[in-house]
Image: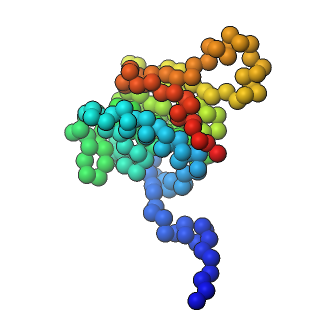
Amino acid sequence: MTSEPIYAEELAWTEPRREELICGKVVMMAPPATNHGVIAGNVHALFHSYLRGKSCTVFPDDVPLFLSDMDYYRPDLMVVCDREKIKADGVHGAPDLVVEILSPSTGRYDRGRKKQIYQASGVPEYWIISPEAQSIEVYRLKDGVYELDNCYSVYPDYLLRLMPEEEREAIPAAFCCHLFDDLVIRLDDVFENLF
């Protein structure tokens, strides 16, 4: 008995549909690209290891986040310290930290409506990670408004070679998570094993 090869396009319909509600409109989520998934796994592993035995919980992108009647999302990662917000169908209310990883189809939402709703809902810390730029923008809520705390980047070798030594040495290779000031996030760990 011979079998015909099955192609990825033919399998697409069997994958579970993933969607978000953004401003009252159902938006289908594209399957994540390889580097998106690698970064999500790396960041999840950092928080999972750190939070072992602590009261806060880290959630990957399959867990729905309900913030308003018009908006529910599936952040790439969120940390929740108030266990009252965790229900069987997802998280209800502002997490303590949200991480979104940019993709071509989601960037405008991550920097637009989602950021506005995270801010209005009182999410204290919001990260936007760019696989392409290998950067992490860290936003902190101050007086109800997000302010860019810092942007951390991995610079390509050719740019590093062009920089004076003192400028290269001033580039941070790690930063502390504001939610947990003893959790050091190394950029090499976040962007490890990219393709």
The residue that appears at 53% across and 41% down in the rendered structure is 39
Quadrant assignment for the N terminus: bottom right
Quadrant assignment for the C terminus: top right
Residue 67 is situated, as x and y percent measured from the top left of the image, at: 34, 41
Q: Quadrant of residue 165?
A: top right
Towards the viewer: 80 or 155: 155
Q: Relative to 106, does residue 18 appear above or below in the rendering?
A: below
The residue that appears at 64% across and 14% down in the rendered structure is 169
Q: Residue furthest bottom?
A: 1
In the displayed structure image, the side of residue 157 where residue 39 appears, left or right: left
The answer to whether residue 29 is seen in the rendering is yes
The residue that appears at 50% across and 56% down in the rendered structure is 28
Q: Quadrant of residue 168?
A: top right
Residue 134 is situated, as x and y percent measured from the top left of the image, at: 61, 34
Residue 61 is situated, as x and y percent measured from the top left of the image, at: 43, 47
Q: Residue furthest front?
A: 1
Towards the viewer: 145 or 34: 34
Residue 21 is situated, as x and y percent measured from the top left of the image, at: 42, 50
Q: Residue furthest top?
A: 166
The residue that appears at 56% across and 41% down in the rendered structure is 102
In the displayed structure image, the side of residue 157 where residue 114 appears, left or right: left
Q: Quadrant of residue 153?
A: top right
Towards the viewer: 30 or 42: 42
